[in-house]
Each structure stands twice: as C-alpha cells, then as structure tokens.
Amino acid sequence: MSRRWALIAATPAALAGLAIATSGAFAGTAGTPVAQNELLCGMFTAAADNFAGQSDIDHPDGATSSGKTYPYSGQNCEASQPSSDGTYAWTIAHSNVHTGGGPQDERGTEHVEFALTVSGGQEAGAQGHVTNFDLSSADKTADTCGSRDVFYASGHQFDAAGSCSPSGPGNFNTHGGAAAGNHFRGNYGTVVYQWGDMTSMSPCQKGSMNYCFEAVLEGQTN
C-alpha cells in the first residue's frame, strides 16, 4: 500500500478529534473572498437499503466517508497529490433515489453534512442531485468509466473522465466561519468507485467490498 493510501486508512482515528464548530460567539467582519478548490479522497461506507412499502425510491441515508483533502488543480484521487492540507468527514444525511427503471432511474437528491479541517472544522452542508446510483439491492452493477467502476455520482461532473455520469446541481456552504475567515462556499461533485486489481495498490479493488470516494469542491473562502 502506498504511503498516501496508508495515511487515508489511518484518517478515521485522526478525525475522532475533529471539532465541529458552531457559529462564533464574537463579532467579526468577512474579508475579501479568495478562490479555493479542494479535492477530497478517502474510503466510502454505503448505507443500507431504505425503501418505504412498495415504493421504488431508496433512501440510503447515513452513508459516510472520511479521508484527506488536497489543493485541487484538476487532478483525481489516483494521481500523485501535493501535500495534504487537512482531513474531512462526510455524511449523506438525507437522500432519495429512484431505482425502478424509467427516465428517473438512478436519479434523486442528497443532503450532506461535512466538516473540513482546512476550513477550521466549521459545520457545513451540501445539497445536490444524484445522477448515478448502483448501491442498492435493486441494482449493484457498476458503470465502467475508464479504469473505474462507478457506483454513485452526485453534483457537478468536475472529474469528467472519472465519473462518466451526467452533471447536476450541487452547492455547499459552511454554517458560519466568516468571523474567522473560514466561510467556504461554492459547488461540489462526488463519485464513489472501485479501481485496480490484486496487482495494484488500490484500497478499493474492483470486485471487492471496499469503495473509494472522491469529491471536488470549487468555491471561495472569506
């Protein structure tokens, strides 16, 4: 296993001390917005099926990911990365996805809660459209995309070569942080996938029970 993936594997323990800050108790003035783009790379734990009655809509709430963040300049998580600038914790709090076929198949919405150490651990939220979903009992057949098998995608298709999924709306925003210059907001896109085989150093080899997670956040901080 490469040093980078070894570090990611160790991240959940490190995240145990990640403080989710609430709104500051002191007054401050937001500064001039500065462009900031982040790449999130880690492991993904899928949620269990959650169908209501005979509905074909799955509500896979509670899926999680944790790992490391890197300054983003167009690379994906398999690329050689610059030095990590922090860690993240990501949870899909509420979601609904069609699984019954037809024009809405594998489409839905998600509401995410997350925190980044690079933005001071501020509590943050994201919401966007799900555009690819192969993580339920209704459909576990991934879509092949280059060297990846893709199981889930949401938001903007920033990594066009890595998701092969339609682009959709996706916005994120920290809940506060302006007083400390940690108000980070913008657009996001995610993909959950497997790649590599037994001869590679992939932590989420094709056909295994492990999934990799990649998110791109493009926005500004002030």
Image (cartoon, grey):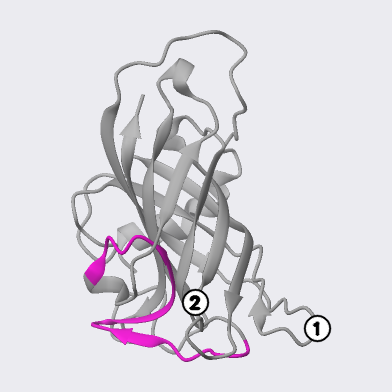
Does the rendering let one see residue 214?
no
Return the x and y of residue 165 as percentages of the image width and height: 34, 75
| Foreground of the two, 98 or 87 | 98
| Foreground of the two, 216 or 55 | 55
Q: Which residue is mark 2?
A: 210
Q: Which mark is residue 53?
A: 1
| Foreground of the two, 28 or 55 | 55
Q: In the rendered structure, which amino acid carries the disc numbered 2?
A: Asn
Q: Residues within 10 Å of mark 1 (few under 14, many from 20)?
A: few
Q: What's the residue at 60%, 65% (across, down)?
A: 63
- Asked where in the image residue 168 lies, by quadrant, the reply is bottom left
Q: In the rendered structure, which amino acid carries the disc numbered 1?
A: Gly
Q: What's the residue at 43%, 10% (across, down)?
A: 29
Does the rendering let one see residue 111?
yes
Look at the image and tell me in which quarter the N terminus lies.
Answer: bottom left
Work out whether mark 1 precedes mark 2 in sequence or the reverse, and give the earlier one: 1
Q: What's the residue at 40%, 50% (across, down)?
A: 68
Look at the image and tell me in which quarter the C terminus lies.
Answer: top left
Return the x and y of residue 120 as percentages of the image width and height: 47, 29
Query: Does the magenta run of residues contain 135?
Result: no
**The residue stretch that appears in magenta:** 137-160
Q: Residues within 10 Å of mark 2 (few under 14, many from 20)?
A: some
Left or right of residue 208: residue 112 = right
